[in-house]
Amino acid sequence: MELNLKRLADILSVFIIAMCFILKVPQIFKLISVKSAKQISILGLSLELTSYTIVASYNYVNRYSLLSYFEYPVILIQDYILMYLILTYSRKMNIWSLFFTIVYITMSICFLSEIIPKIVLTFLTPMCTPISASSKIMQLVAIIRAKNADSISPLTWFISALSNLIRVFTIWMDSVDILLLGNFIISVLLSSSIMFSSLYYKYYNVKQD
């Protein structure tokens, strides 16, 4: 029974990783289509990048199974594209964005190579839950304030909620890491909230028209 559950967890992990290859693609194409990032929170995306980088590094340096966290590098690549598009459409591509990019790359290399001791990641990882939650809350607030979700892709947030929900099970079967479990459960709730909010305002605005 336990062996069958472990196999199921591995299959679901592969499924999650496959989904994450297209997680942000609808959002990327949405931004390219509307050529606007008015309802996207730059600070929220920056916090998400920070959180995902720390969690990916934490998993890597602890030598956890690649199947249990490979979606993070995949999502990060898509987030880099999103950040580029958002900065471009918001006309905020400047010397400061270059500076923070260099700082981010340097810190990431130091984490992965353990120039910064592993204990630091162990200390930072619990903070990723509030950081990740804050990033999603900021995105939710940005939608509510604008009362518009034209530049938001509900499909992206549906995939996010679903993949996080499945990941709760796979983490439970692989490492039972409470830090990671708490992070994923909260992510499910907040990703779902953003999805439903974007759907509501899309329906609301159509109804108003």
Image (cartoon, rainbow, N blue to C red):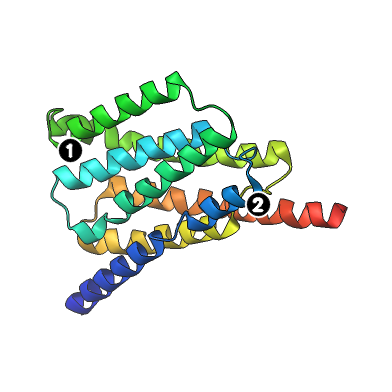
* Location of mark 1 (residue): 112
Element carrying mark 2: helix
In the rendered structure, which disc, 2 or 1, sits on the residue that comes first in sequence? 1
Q: Is residue 144 left or right of residue 82?
A: right
Viewer-side label of 2, 1 = 1
Label 1 neighbour load within 10 Å: few <14, some 14-19, many 20+: many
Q: Is residue 3 above or below residue 206?
A: below
Identify the amino acid type marked 2.
Ser
Residue 4's spot in the image, x, y percent? Answer: 22, 79
Locate residue 85, reporting x and y percent. Answer: 51, 40
Q: Secondary structure at mark 1?
A: helix
Residue 60 position within the rendered picture, expressed as x and y whole percent measured from the top left: 18, 46
Count of numbered circles on the image: 2
Q: Quadrant of the N terminus?
A: bottom left
Q: Which residue is mark 2?
A: 198
Q: Residue at x 61, y 49 (%)?
A: 152
Q: Is residue 162 left or right of residue 119?
A: right
What x and y, as percent, mark residue 38? Answer: 65, 37
Depth check, front residue: 104 or 91 = 91
Between residues 193 and 181, which one lies in front from this camera angle? 193
Say which residue appears at 72% left-offset and 45% top-offset. Answer: 148
For the residues labelled 2 and 1, the Cα–Cα distance comes to 36 Å
> Residue at coordinates 29% horizontally, 68% vertically from top-left?
14
Q: Amino acid at mark 1?
A: Leu
* Disc ID at residue 122: none
Give the answer, above or below, for where 76 lies relative to 50.
below
